[in-house]
Amino acid sequence: MSYCAIILAAGKGHRYSKTIPKQYTVFDNELIINYSLKIFSEINTIKKIILVINKPQFTKFKDRVYRNKKITIIQGGKERKDSVFLALSRLQRANYKKILIHDAARPFLKKKLLNKIIKFSKKNEAVIPYTSNTDTIVFKNKILDRKKVLSIQTPQCFSYKKIFFLHKEYKNKKFSDESSLYLYKNLKVKKILGDYDNIKITIKKDLNNDKKISYGIGYDIHKLEKDYKLYLGGIYIPYSMGTVGHSDGDPVIHALIDSLLGSKKLGDIGTLFPNNKKFKNKRSTFFLKKVINFIEAKNIKINNIDINIIAQKPNLKKYKNIISKNLAKICNVSENQISVKGKTTDRLGNVGKNKAIACEVISSVTNN
Ligand code: CTP
Ligand code: MG
């Protein structure tokens, strides 16, 4: 049996934002609308996809909207039901027995659910996915049985002829999805358990763009020599030797900077602060402050930073807290977000022979 899918993306998304329509918002480097287009395109039994759009919005984003031979784009209508009706009308001569209708505003649909709906549609005229509620549900001061209150999702699957017929019959009635038409008429529908992740993006909070965590790693090593000062994490450590470097040679801050830049693919310390005259003998705290300003301007928020300082000598026990306090202040985070650990290499290698001090850092960040 061959299927046609209607993907609805002609809404204004006013509850989400007055400026950028939700279906054209970027989530995890992909337009919301593309998630649905891709998943439906991957199913072999779906031979055609009608993408319903609103032209003025679409024009701005059309270069980034996913396309292939299966996809036909049409102009939608005023309400969701008008958009569906226009798509159904378009298919009158196409001879598809089954029609899948999906909101582009549900980007988290998984193939597993889509395939399950298709499977059930072979023996059922109408298949709709639902989830049940966990909150107490009150209607006009009456408590309803929450297990019996269902939230209906898309995609929904119907016989093409029947759903087109019902759309015409209820042309003057308001309804928010096609399952409503079957339910008004008390027609048989097969309800199957949907997916709690398959939410409809409606308000800003629904898209946890800000909750996307990314990580960056940084590493640095500097030679230890007499007649140099030792700075670790911006703190002066009294010791018989110090680190050699173009700047003050602070491996902790250098590794930290690289980890922060790496977490959002913003380059590395050498690109931002090359080994030229301008940065000669500069304190590394100067670079870190610049990087913090840079990432804050990009709305990047630090979650936590984990630091390993690898030094045979001096013993850093009494400095760990001081370093974490100092870095927290510069990074505008609390002390609890920065962990500083000390490590020796059991006298192995250059660090073990006290010829160098190294540092490795992992930073975790999110977008504000
Ligand atoms: N939709 C559509 N044509 C319309 C209205 C809505 O194709 N005239 C689509 C939306 O793009 C969305 C789906 O129907 O994918 C569900 O609608 P809804 O969540 O209400 O989205 P919007 O109408 O865009 O949002 P809002 O009601 O907040 O303006
Ligand atoms: Mg709407």
Image: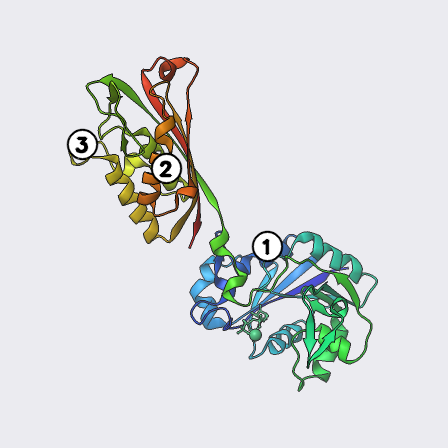
CA distance for labels 2 and 1: 46 Å
Q: Which residue is mark 3?
A: 280
Where ligand 1 lies, by image quadrant? bottom right
Q: Residues within 10 Å of mark 1 (few under 14, many from 20)?
A: few
Frontmost residue, 84 versus 239: 239
Q: Earlier in the sequence, mark 2 or mark 3?
A: 3
Locate residue 168, reporting x and y percent.
Answer: 70, 82
Q: Residues within 10 Å of mark 3 (few under 14, many from 20)?
A: some
Q: Which residue is mark 1?
A: 38
SS for callout 1: helix
The three-letter code of the residue at mark 1 reads: Lys
Q: Given the current orientation, which residue lies at the most extreme bottom position?
A: 172
Q: Nearer the viewer, mark 2 or mark 1?
A: 2
Q: Is residue 322 above or below residue 89?
A: above
CA distance for labels 2 and 3: 26 Å
The three-letter code of the residue at mark 3 reads: Lys
Q: Which quarter shows the N terminus? A: bottom right
Q: Nearer the viewer, mark 2 or mark 3?
A: 2
Q: Which residue is mark 2?
A: 324
Locate residue 133, reporting x and y percent.
Answer: 70, 65
**Which residue shows up at 30% across the image and 36% down it?**
269
Q: Is residue 243 above or below residue 263?
A: above
SS for callout 3: loop
Q: Which quarter shows the C terminus? A: bottom left
Locate residue 103, reporting x and y percent.
Answer: 61, 66
